[in-house]
Structures are given as C-alpha cells and as structure tokens.
Amino acid sequence: MSSTTVESTPSPRGAESRAQRSGNGSSSGPGPSFLRVLNSEFIKFRTLLSTLILLGSTVVVMVGFGALSAWGTGQFSEAAAQDPEVAARLAAQGGDIAVSVPTSGIAFAQLILGSLGVLLMSSEFTTGMARSTFAAVPKRIPAFAAKLVVVVLTSFVITAASTLVAGLVSVPILDNYGLGLDLGSSQSVKLLVVNSIYVAAVAAIGMALGTLIRNSAGGIMSLVGLFFVAPIAFQLIPGDFFVEARKYLPGNTVDPLTAVEHVPDTLEAWQAGLVLGAWVVVPVLLAAILLKKRDV
Amino acid sequence: MIEARGLTKVYGDKTAVAGVNFTVEAGRVTGFLGPNGAGKSTTMRMIMGLDRPTSGSVTVNGSPLTGHAAPLRDVGALLDAKAVHTSRSAYNHLLAMAATHSIPKKRVHEVIEMTGLAEVARKKVGGFSLGMGQRLGIAAALLGDPQTVILDEPVNGLDPEGVVWVRNLVKYLASEGRTVFLSSHLMSEMAVTADHLIVIGRGRIIADAPIQEIITGKGQGRTRVRTDQPDRLMQLLAGTGVSVEAQERELLEVTGLDPRQIATAALENHVMIYELTPLQASLEEAYMELTKDEVEYHSLITTGAVPVEAGGN
C-alpha cells in the first residue's frame, strides 16, 4: 500500500444535504427496486471470468458434440444402406435420426450450466460476498429472485443459441451422407425449445442447491448425484418401486416432453412437464425460505 | 442513531450476545471494545440484518435495516475486509453494489479515489493485501454516502498512514453529523479516535460512557517524575491520598497529585525534575480492569497480557 496516495480529507460530497438529513431515517435517493437488483446481479454475472468460461465451454461442447454426432449418424446411415441388419435397427429407431443431432450435447450442457447455477450462489457464501449483497438488499428475496432470473435466462439463451449453431454446423455434415436436417421443422424447434427450458430448469435447481448447501463442491456433487448417479442407481436397484421412481427423476422428463408419440412405460408429456416443474419449484421455494430465515 | 434493545443472539448452547441495550448517537465516534468472542461482530451483523436476533431488536434511525427503503444510502458497513468475490475487480464489485441503488458511476470513482484504490481498482480482489481489502471495504461502506457508518476493525492490516487516514475519516464523518460506530482491538487507537466507548464482554455491556470518563473513572491519574533527588521529592510529596512509588533510580510514579502540584512542590524546594509525564493514556488499563472477569479466553502464558482481538468471533 505504500505506493498509493492517501487523501487525508475525504471528499465532502453530500455535505450540504447532510445538514438536512442528519438525525432522521429517511433515505434520499432510490433504493433497491427489483430492476436495479437485477441490473446488479447481471453486472456480477458478467464480471466473473469463470462465468464467461463456463458459458463459452457450453457453446463449444454443444457445437462439438453436434458435429461429432452428425458425423457418427452419417456413418451409421451409410452402414445401414449396405447392411440390412443395421437398417432394421435404424428403422426400429423411428427413421428420423438426424433431428436430434443438434441437441446431442445436452447432457454436458446441463452439467456445466447446472454447476454454474450452483457456483453463482455458493460462491457468494464461500467468498463472503453474500454479506455485501444482503447488506445492500436486506430483504434478501429480491437478490435471490434477480439472480434466479439471470441464471435461468442466460442458461436458456446459451442452450438455445448453441443448439442452433450446432444445427447449422451439422447440416452440411449430414448433407454429405445424404441425410436431411430441417432446422425449421416443428420437431427441430420443439427439441430446441424443450431442451433449452430443461437446461434452464437444471440451472435453477443448481442455484437452489447452491443456496441450500452454501458450498460449491457439495452443491455440484448433489447436482451430479441427482442427474447422473440417481438414474443409474435406480436402474441397478431391483424392485418395481425404483423402476417407477426412475421415471420421476428430473433427467428423465425430457424424452417424454420431446417424444413424437407417447412411448410406453414413460410419463405422458403433460405429466413430465409437471414433474420437471415440481423439481424446480420445490427446491427454489425451499431455498428462498431458508435464505430469508438463516443467518448470512 | 443505532438503538439496541434487549438484543440477544444464541448459537446452539452459546449465548453470543445477552440482551444488550445501547444507543449509538449521531455526531460522534462511538467505539466498540471487547475481548475475543465478546459479541462485537455478532452485534454488528445483527445491526446489518445479516444475523437474526434470537430476541430483542436493533434499529437504525428507528427501524430495522430490512425496513429501510434504501439501506445502502442509510447504513454503510465494513464487517469483513473481504466480503467480496475474490475473482472480481474492486471496480466491478463497487459497480455491482452501486447498481442496486442506482448510485452513479461517478460516485464509484469517487470512493475509489477517496480510499486510495485508484491504482488497483481494476485488479482482482483476491490478490489484495489485507490493507487494500480494508480500503475496499471502507469504499463500499461509503458508496451510498450513508448517514450511519459501521466499521468492524477498520484499521486491521492498515499501514500507519492508513491508520491515520481512517482516524481522520471517522472523525470527519462524525463531524458531519453522521453516526459512526467502530470496533477496534487497538485500545490506544480508540483513545485517540473515539468520543464515546461501549465496552462489551461475554455478550454483556460492561461500560457505556464518554471515553474520558472511562479512562479517569478507573483510578486516579498518575504522573511519572524523574529527578536527581528522588528521596527528597518523595518526602515533599507525601500526604494523604498521595502515593509515591519509586520505580527505579531517579524515577517516581505519583498518584493523587496532578503534574502542576508536583512541579510547584519541586520548584518551591529547589528540587530539579527533568521529566514530568502525565500517565493518562491508560485506556488499556481501564479496559483490562473492566474486562478482567469477562475475558473468554484467558492467556495462560503471561498474566498481564492484553487480550488481543484477532478479528471477530
């Protein structure tokens, strides 16, 4: 600190208004309205390099997996043209295998953006930033809601945009193998929208976990447990209960929501929508209630 | 003005703050003193609405912080030097804080200049020294030009220049009619900074009085005298209510007489004295005296050790 200059007298800004204000509690000037807190949360979001790296990684992973998947799908369909056995398997899959190519990286996007959701809140607590945040917004809930809006909107936009780019990259690759991918088809649009909503939901769940657990590693591990470990564990545990319960895991709601027609032994689309909604609403409400109650 | 009424905070089976009542008035610097774990930081966090009181209440200008329309413009606090995301720059941190209250960028630059952070404002806070972290905390506290300023151990980690700067700053803020509440473990610092002292020990208020009263209230003022003829002077000064202690050769410590009376006695009897020092700055002693039964963690090594505050509980 020896190199910095120290002013012995602070700037007297506000000295005149001070005389009128001193001794009473009335604030002069605007307070933390929701839009201002939202702006603050957005500044916090964009001024962290780690956030930008995670967003960039999502795009890279989504586009990379889209391209790889386009190539693999092309190889597969080429093999099918020569081998009746493979052709039969292809037919069993419902024919249009190109349409899901742009969203083939979703599993990784949800992991990255879900972790981002965890980190944005857990880092508030691990770094002590929460004390600054909630001293400025003592009601706490506006700051939580604003951060949720930032997390959900960003996750949706990034997923949708990277799905679109992945699609644009995949089209010429698929074209090489004589496969057509119409990004404007209703199924393409449906996949893009549903998957983007789904990833936004995962990010919201992540943020709720980060708020509840207040620890980055713990929050991310819980998220991984819910989305990656539980589905496998439920499959391995014998018994009808786990077979049934597995359908209600948040990660298993996307297929019913995007299916062209209802697949037996899965949830109906509307049921899947409700289940996913519940998986978001319950943790988020719980997180908000506990955030309001607990000490920072 | 900050008012605590029956303010209590219990963590599990440990009572951190036990029903304290105090008022921090505007227009003066109020110091908050107490040994480790006495409840200072807990009290300050409750003022800021970060910790919920178990019972009782604390208000700033008549209402709890959650009831304020523009909290950052009413109360600014430095509770922890690094209540900041370590990967964000100081400027962006202040910018995000300012955005919650539509505080203009101009003010962000002002507080950066004011706290001497201009050169490092664009650097990540994670690389800051403790002193720079304190300056950033003070910058954040002043961001909303608040009527009430709360500083928890503001001079911790500051260089001597910074200590003087904080001292002048808090005095200046109080002179503007603001409420200034600061804790410090540097009791000598309190003696030259604070106008009023609240002493806390084991969650209870031990003393709440003007600083002068706390210093003089505990025992009479002492004076150190050096003379060529200590024996002669001892005889001259002897009297009721006066105690003279020979500390070493030619050095006496006199209690019960003020320096003028000692000098007069010496002059009249042609005893030369070559040092006459009023030992008034004994806030440490007053503090030790006040808190001796309240210290949470007694030092086992030295009996006379000052309980050093390591920064919060």
Image (cartoon, coloured by chain):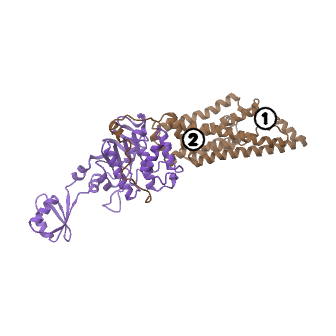
Chain colours: A brown, B purple
- Quadrant for the N terminus of chain A in the image: bottom left
Left or right side of A69 for A253: left
Cα distance between the residues tagged 1 and 2:
38 Å
Residue placed most toward the observer, B100 or A281: B100
Residue at x 16% of width, y 58% of height: B258
Residue A148 lies, in percent from the top left, at: 56, 37
Residue A231 lies, in percent from the top left, at: 68, 40
Within the image, what quadrant is residue B288 found in?
bottom left
Residue picked out by circle 2:
A209
Query: Looking at the image, is mark 1 or mark 2 earlier in the sequence?
Result: 1
Q: Chain of mark 1?
A: A
Q: Is residue A148 visible?
A: yes
Q: Amino acid at mark 1?
A: Asp
Residue placed most toward the observer, A287 or B86: B86
How many marks do you count on the picture? 2
Residue placed most toward the observer, B275 or B91: B91
Residue picked out by circle 1:
A182
Residue at x 62% of width, y 32% of height: A277
Within the image, what quadrant is residue B224 found in?
bottom left
Residue A162 lies, in percent from the top left, at: 69, 41
Residue at x 13% of width, y 57% of height: B241
